[in-house]
Amino acid sequence: MSKKERRRTRISGSVDKLPEGIRLQLDAKLMDTSNSYTDLALWLKEEGYPVSRSAIVRYAIRSNQAAQRVAETLQRTQAIAAAVEAHPDMDYTKAASMVLMDGLMQRVSTAEEDFAEMPLDKAGRLIASLNRAATYEKKVRQDMKKRAELAFEEMETELMAAIRQDPELKDELHGILLRAKEKVLREDG
């Protein structure tokens, strides 16, 4: 790794090192907008944890960003769940791909600096992975369509052989089979 490349590590500020009980109390106090960051720094100092005002500000910003990401993810997940509920025949892999793509696009739109630092080969692998998923989905749909066509052809051959003795029944069943085939292939395509 070169000097310019930076490995992403988990952020651990002085607030993150506080005991969980104190940090939970701080979180509650941060929710109350009547508390200033200076007041919170003084409170922590009185509790025996000298933490700077700027450390509390940074922690509050990170916490708010994390909460916002969770809320946005929850909103996207609920929208997809509603779509799947409204369309039970929906392909779940496609829904999952939509969630992944949405997350990636949001990340792309807010991560200019990250992409500037991302190695070109990694960006290429991400693009290739997305293209492979789209190609795989298309191939699966084509394979399913071919299998359905073959199954209907085999069924038609067997039915026609069994009912050749009754021409009226033969024409009626042939029409039913054609309508069923059109409906299935239209829904798959």
Image (cartoon, rainbow, N blue to C red):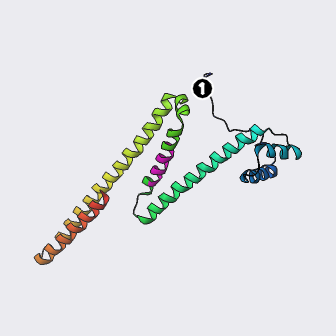
Judge by depth and name the residue closer to the eye, 32 or 77. Answer: 32
Compared with 16, 173 (above or below) is below
Say above or below: 6 vs 138. above
Judged left or right of residue 54, residue 134 is left
143 and 24: which one is in front? 24
Q: Which image quarter is the N terminus in?
A: top right
Which span is picked out in magenta?
95-104
Which amino acid type is shown beneath numbered disc 1? Glu
Residue 119 pos. (x, y %): 52, 28
Instruction: Please provide percent x and percent y for residue 166.
Output: 12, 78
Q: Residue at x 39, y 63 (%)?
A: 89
Horizontally, residue 181 falls left or right of residue 75, namely left
Q: Residues within 10 Å of mark 1 (few under 14, many from 20)?
A: few
For the stretch drawn in magenta, the main secondary structure is helix
Residue 13 within the magenta-colored segment of the rendering: no
x%, y% of residue 96? 47, 52
Residue 60 makes an appearance in the image: yes
Residue at x 63% of width, y 34% of height? 8
Residue of label 1: 5
- Element type where label 1 sits in the image: loop
The answer to whether residue 180 is above or below residue 66 is below
Side of 113 relative to 25 (left or right): left
Viewport quadrant of the C terminus = bottom left
Residue at 52% x, 29% y: name it: 116
Residue 151 in which image quadrant: bottom left
Horizontally, residue 33 falls left or right of residue 22, namely left
Q: Quadrant of residue 88?
A: bottom left
Let me know if residue 163 appears in the view: no
Q: Residue furthest top?
A: 3
Residue 45 in the image: x percent, y percent?
Answer: 86, 43
